[in-house]
Amino acid sequence: MKFSFGGVRRQLGRVKMAVVRRRRPDYILLKQGHSSVDAHNIAEAMQHYVQASKMHTDNKFIAGQKLLDYINGNEISKGDLNAIIDGLHTSPDFSVADLYEAVIRKAIVFEDCDISRLTKFARDLGWGRVSEIGSTLLGDGIHEPAMRAYDLAAALDPSNVGLRLQMGITEFLAGHYKAAERHWVHTEHIRSSERHKWGLENNNTRFMGHTWFPAIGHVAFIDTHLKATALGWRSDEQPK
């Protein structure tokens, strides 16, 4: 049996590093944060995590993953969610993939949700991804949280015509007809402003967004109109 001093030194080095790491204040705070999460004491956990992340940047990923697993695996109370949001605002780069989205999904379920506190997270995701959260909820027939997701997306891109139309449709499906009309009027105002901006008021030209083309009925409608005009079956009127 061969004996290697080099192998012994390497093993002792690993043990020493492990001992040092366990004695590091940030590592202790991280472990305390994990214990607090397991005990469902989220406010205390966030305090430990924020401190640990300030001491060593890598800790934000470890803490963030622990929080994401907790959010996805548990029913979160409003108090716990607010504690998480407060902590994320305190430490701006405290995040892992999907953590912000998970927070938004949980927060918009509450009727008195303050979406202004979620704007930071929504901005990181982008209006499109936030809008998808609303569309998923709407597909499940959950109108009010879907509307809050759309409101959050609209705060990032207030002149998005397609998004405004979807907001009107969501309100209409929920039976909020006056609110739906307000969104549609606002949509027409955006369109009018864009026509004026590009000098198209008196020009027989219109731009169609990408939402026109996935629906076969829309394509058939415009195709029929253009061909009928080209064949002289109807006058070449300016689109209304």
Image: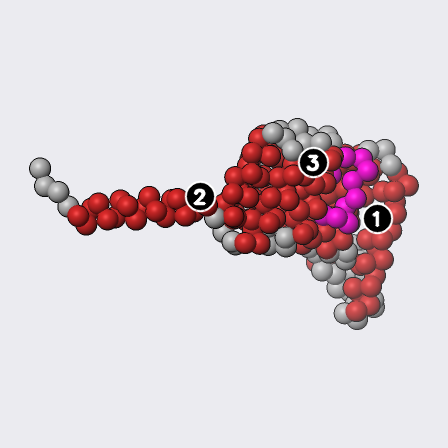
Q: Is residue 144 left or right of residue 43?
A: right
> Looking at the picture, how far across and down is residue 46, in whole percent?
63, 42
> Looking at the picture, how far across and down is residue 190, in whole percent?
81, 58
The residue at the point 76 percent across, 69 percent down is: 198
Q: Secondary structure at mark 2?
A: helix
Q: From which residue to which does the magenta span run?
A: 108-118
The amino acid sitting under disc 1 is Trp
Q: Is residue 186 magenta?
A: no
* Residue 237 visible in image: no
> Looking at the picture, how far across and down is residue 157, in whole percent?
73, 56
Direction right: furthest residue: 178
The amino acid sitting under disc 2 is Arg
The amino acid sitting under disc 3 is Asp
As rendered, which of 27 and 203 lies closer to the eye? 27
Choose mark 1 or mark 3, whichever is in front.
Answer: 3
Q: Secondary structure at mark 1?
A: helix
Q: Secondary structure at mark 3?
A: helix
- Looking at the image, is 78 positioned above or below residue 199? above
Circle 3 Cα neighbour tier, 10 Å, few/some/many (<14 / 14–19 / ≥20): some
Residues at marks 2 and 1 touching, judged by CB atoms closer than 8 Å: no
The residue at the point 22 percent across, 45 percent down is: 8
As rendered, which of 17 and 203 lies closer to the eye? 17
Q: Which residue is mark 3?
A: 80
The residue at the point 56 percent across, 34 percent down is: 35
Q: Which residue is mark 1?
A: 184
